Amino acid sequence: MSNIETRKAGAVRIEQTEPQPGEPLRLNGIAANWERYDMGNCYERLEPTCFDASIKADGDKIALLWNHDTAKPMGRVSAGNLKVYSDRSGLCFECDLPDTDTSEEAHALVRAGIVTQCSFGFICLKETYEPPIKGETKGTRVIHLAKLLEVSVVTFPANPATSVEARAEQPKAKARKIYLPPPQF
């Protein structure tokens, strides 16, 4: 059992840089921003400090994945090739990619403009709900504290509407169970 959530929070940015001879391929991106976004039956907003404690305490465990696939890692903080941090723009990452087929494919697809989005996987530790703003019918789930597990370069970012089935009809705190299949090797 797991309560891992994945999300694409509003507009995100991913960039690749052309390496100089002998330098690794590199991807830079913003995996989440701090703007409110529509989840279907409610809005959701990440507090700008929601990942800070997780990055400080367990940051070495954070990975960069291809499409949230744990069998296709491209970076890890503890390996020294991934940097993850929060700034005014959002949850940012910089990764010097290893010499693997997955990394080369991801870099090529980003360079070609075919893959342009990022996402992130997290466990919510503290949340509150704000009532609807005047003129709106949906409240806002505010994530104050979360354990960051991974950032991902994704072909199809998580569509907020597809997460509705894991939500109550009205926004309120609720235990979530998401069953993930074991990685395929």
Image (tube, rainbow, N blue to C red):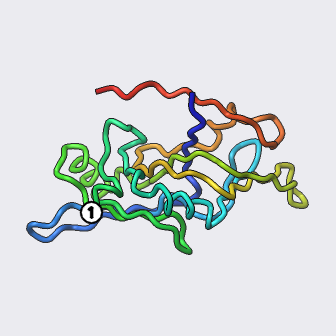
In the visual, does 78 lie left or right of 53? Answer: left
Residue 184 at x, y = what percent? Answer: 33, 26
**Quadrant of the rendered image containing residue 16:** bottom left
Residue drawn at point x = 43 percent, y = 63 percent? 84
At which x and y percent is residue 19? 18, 68
Choose between 180 and 61: the one closer to the eye: 61
State left or right for residue 36 relative to residue 137.
Answer: left
Q: In percent of the image, x 51 and y 63: which residue is there? A: 91
- Please identify the residue farthest to the front as the structure is shown: 57
Residue 164 vs residue 100, the one in the foreground: 100
Q: Position of residue 6 (x, y in %)?
A: 54, 43
Q: Quadrant of the N terminus?
A: top right
Quick check: 50 left or right of 170? left
Badge 1 is on which residue? 26
Q: Against 125, is 15 above or below? A: below
**Secondary structure beneath label 1:** strand
- Taking the spot 81% from the left edge, 42% from the top edge, the residue there is 172
**Which amino acid is tagged 1?**
Arg
